[in-house]
Amino acid sequence: MKKFISSIAVGALVLVGGAISSAPANAATTPTLTLAERAAVYGLGAFPITATASVAGIVKVTADGVVIPGCEALATTTATPFIAKCLWTPSKGGAIVLSGTLTPTDAANFTTATATLTARVGLPSQGIVNPISMYVDTVLASGTSGVLAPRFGISCAITNEFILGQGIVFRVYANNADLAGAVMDSTNTAEAYIEVAGMKDPIPLSYGNHSGISFWTAVIRTGTGPGQYSTLGQISYKVTMRSKDLSSIKVLSTKLVRKMVNGVPVKVDGTQVYERIPAYRTVQLSVPLKGAVAAYVPNWTAASLLTVYAVPKA
């Protein structure tokens, strides 16, 4: 009898102990959500956005706080990885903040989750400039100063990285649509110059022959000597070109020409076949057309921008 009572007491303690140590109901878990977008380019249509979640649910995606059409309620796949996709047409170039909100299907066990991604929508390097388009690069000038002379600086290597004491050559060429795409040279260009951060006056561009190839150039000599450019780090610059006023312009038109195959006129049922091709015609202006102005400011990634470094220590 004593043994039986003891067993009951032990059992009661076990039950009480179990009641005391029992855990409360599990709290809802916050799932994960990530966004990814293919490098979008402004003006080239729609680009995909991919949302990846740790649980199934519905995803909403916004761009700079505005819901993206077609991305309002995206159902994820029902098996891992839980993915939802939609298409996005950027309304502008530059940095745009994409935000996603996940509403889990199992709302009892999972809370909503959010994610953000800063998309850098591509813009043309020069931007929309009409009628003048430009090409600009920098190359290593021959001749150096300081501790680099005379070993370094004997090539014309294209680069954006220079060491103090080296010379920077800006190479520029341009075409003018008002002249049917003709090259801009000293006969049709009113002014061409480069403005460089840290330099008081613009540097004139000079048009000339370089080993049989003609283009515009300007030179900066870096170093610590008098008149030399000594600023270190990324160097901002702007290239500006202005064409001369025009008394006549080339206007794009079309013309019909006989269709030829291997030098033989094409005929169908004995009738000559014609095709239309682009052609320019010259229009004389009673009032001269004011010269066009174009500007180029490089907007590459930081690693590709013009940079001047100190001479490395031995």
Image (cartoon, grey):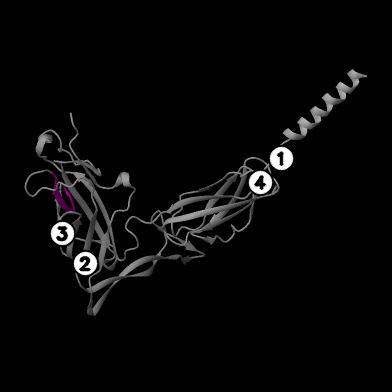
Q: Amino acid at mark 1?
A: Pro
On residue 243, the disc is: 2
Residue 277 image offset from top left, x and y in percent: 39, 65
Mark before the other along the chain sequence, 1 or 3: 1
Q: Residue at x 26, y 72 (%)?
A: 249
Which element type, helix, strand or loop, lies under badge 1? loop
Q: Which residue is mark 3?
A: 202
**Left or right: 144 as drawn, with respect to 96:** left
| Dot 4 and dot 2 residues touching (CB under 8 Å) | no
**Residue that badge 1 annotates:** 24
Q: Which mark is residue 110?
A: 4
Task: Give the alpha-carbon distance from disc 1 to disc 4, as whole Å.
Answer: 17 Å
Q: Closer to the camera: disc 4 or disc 2?
A: 4
Q: Nearer the viewer, mark 1 or mark 2?
A: 1
- The magenta-colored residue range is 211-222
Q: Camera-side residue: 214 or 230?
A: 230
Q: Are the residues flagged by discs 4 and 3 in contact, CB closer than 8 Å?
A: no
| Amino acid tagged 3 | Pro
* Magenta run includes residue 215: yes
Mark toward the start of the polypeptide (1 vs 4): 1
Q: Nearer the viewer, residue 267 or 1?
A: 1
Q: Quadrant of the N terminus?
A: top right
Q: Which mark is residue 120?
A: none
Could you tell which of marks 2 and 3 lies nearer the N-terminus? 3
- Mark closer to the observer (1, 4): 1
